[in-house]
């Protein structure tokens, strides 16, 4: 017969206070986030430090900083809070895993092209489910997923995602896009790597995983990156239309951006570069089965290749 572990000498609420102070580096702002008075928060943190026998924060009138021991313990506190949230979510989802709210992140180079197609299908398929979409770059979504701020994220598998499970939603090949006056857009045959040698290729700004994939292809083609870096695919398409260079758009965005900017498109020769759009979630998430069903609905809404 197994024995029960000794009772834990602190509360999840105390851990929440510690994480808030570490995030905001301010007892006042941490108290506001946690909806508690500053003296109450300070007292609970002092009790937590006494219980653990470790000083978590250096503090004076001017600033608050985690100690070296405090940083490590706060990261463990984050995991405990996330696991506690998962436990609550598992209990709620036990009766109906597709009721309530799912927090799903999505990258900007997918959101405007897939959500208009998929959101209505999700509402019809799961009428009791509300999806709260969060649009951010990949690194931010991965961090939010790890910390428990998201239940899942829709992004490209080619980016570093950490320890996640996933379901593939669709394959998204890249397409060469050029202004009507650009000779690179004139041919009907697929563009080979050597066709782009010396071409000026416009790319997204740093932080977009799509930029890294397109840049790798350009380096292989010995193309040069244009001086302008766009913040969105819409801006990228408009700059190509102005004659500053060519670009690679994901097929998912072509019907919207190439048509809007009246650009010519050209397939790339095989093996054509592509990204893999997938719904990812934390390994061992209690929502895994529900998220697989959501991924299935997204896959059905995904545009079929020509």
Image (cartoon, rainbow, N blue to C red):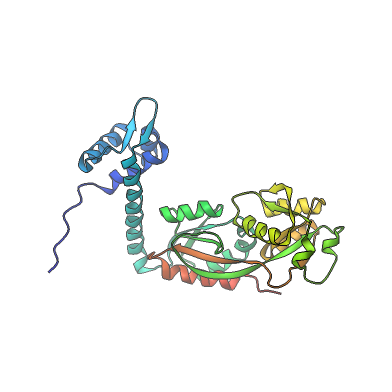
From the image, which quarter does the N terminus lie in?
bottom left
Percent x, y for residue 33?
39, 40
Q: Residue at x 87, y 57 (%)?
A: 181
Q: Is residue 217 above or below residue 300?
A: above
Residue 38 lies in quadrant = top left
> Going by the picture, which residue comes out furthest to the top?
61
Instruction: Give the left or right position of residue 252, taking residue 106 as reference.
Output: right
Taking the spot 57% from the left edge, 71% from the top edge, the residue there is 299
Measured along the vertical axis of the image, is residue 139 above or below residue 298?
Answer: above
Quadrant in the picture for the C terminus: bottom right
Total marks drawn? Answer: 0
Q: Let me know if residue 37 appears in the view.
A: no
Residue 76, can we see it? Answer: yes
From this view, report whether residue 38 is shown above or below residue 153: above
Left or right: 139 as drawn, with respect to 245: left
* Residue drawn at 73 percent across, 68 percent down: 268
204 on left or right of 18: right
Q: Along the line of sight, which residue is nearer the eye, 271 or 1?
A: 271
Where residue 75 appears, x then y in whole percent? 36, 48
In-front residue for pair 95/226: 226
Taking 118 as reference, is 38 above or below it? above
Instruction: Please state which of residues 42 and 173 is positioned toward the viewer in this rendering.
Output: 173
């Amino acid at each position: 017969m197994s024995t029960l572990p000794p009772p834990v000498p602190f509360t999840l609420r105390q851990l929440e206070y510690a994480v808030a102070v570490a995030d905001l580096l301010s007892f006042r702002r941490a108290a506001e986030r946690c909806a508690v008075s500053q003296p109450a928060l300070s007292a609970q943190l002092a009790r937590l430090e006494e219980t653990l026998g470790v000083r978590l924060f250096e503090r004076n009138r001017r600033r608050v900083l985690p100690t070296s021991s405090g940083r490590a313990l706060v990261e463990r506190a984050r995991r405990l809070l996330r696991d506690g949230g998962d436990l609550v979510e598992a209990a709620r989802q036990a009766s109906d895993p597709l009721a309530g709210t799912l927090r799903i992140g999505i990258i900007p180079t997918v959101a405007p092209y897939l959500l208009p197609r998929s959101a209505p299908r999700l509402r019809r398929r799961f009428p009791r489910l509300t999806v709260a979409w969060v649009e951010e770059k990949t690194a931010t979504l991965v961090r939010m997923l790890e910390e428990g701020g998201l239940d899942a994220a829709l992004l490209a598998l080619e980016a570093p995602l950490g320890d996640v499970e996933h379901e593939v939603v669709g394959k998204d090949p890249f397409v060469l896009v050029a202004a009507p006056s650009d000779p690179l857009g004139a041919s009907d045959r697929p563009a080979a790597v050597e066709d782009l040698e010396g071409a000026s290729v416009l790319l997204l700004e740093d932080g977009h995983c799509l930029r890294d994939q397109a840049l790798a292809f350009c380096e292989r083609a010995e193309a040069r990156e244009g001086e302008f870096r766009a913040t969105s695919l819409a801006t990228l398409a408009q700059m190509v239309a102005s004659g500053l260079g060519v670009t690679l758009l994901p097929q998912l965005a072509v019907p919207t951006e190439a048509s809007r900017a009246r650009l010519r498109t050209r397939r790339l020769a095989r093996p054509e570069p592509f990204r893999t759009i997938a719904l990812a979630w934390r390994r061992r998430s209690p929502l895994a089965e529900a998220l697989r069903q959501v991924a299935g609905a997204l896959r059905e809404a995904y545009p079929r290749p020509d």
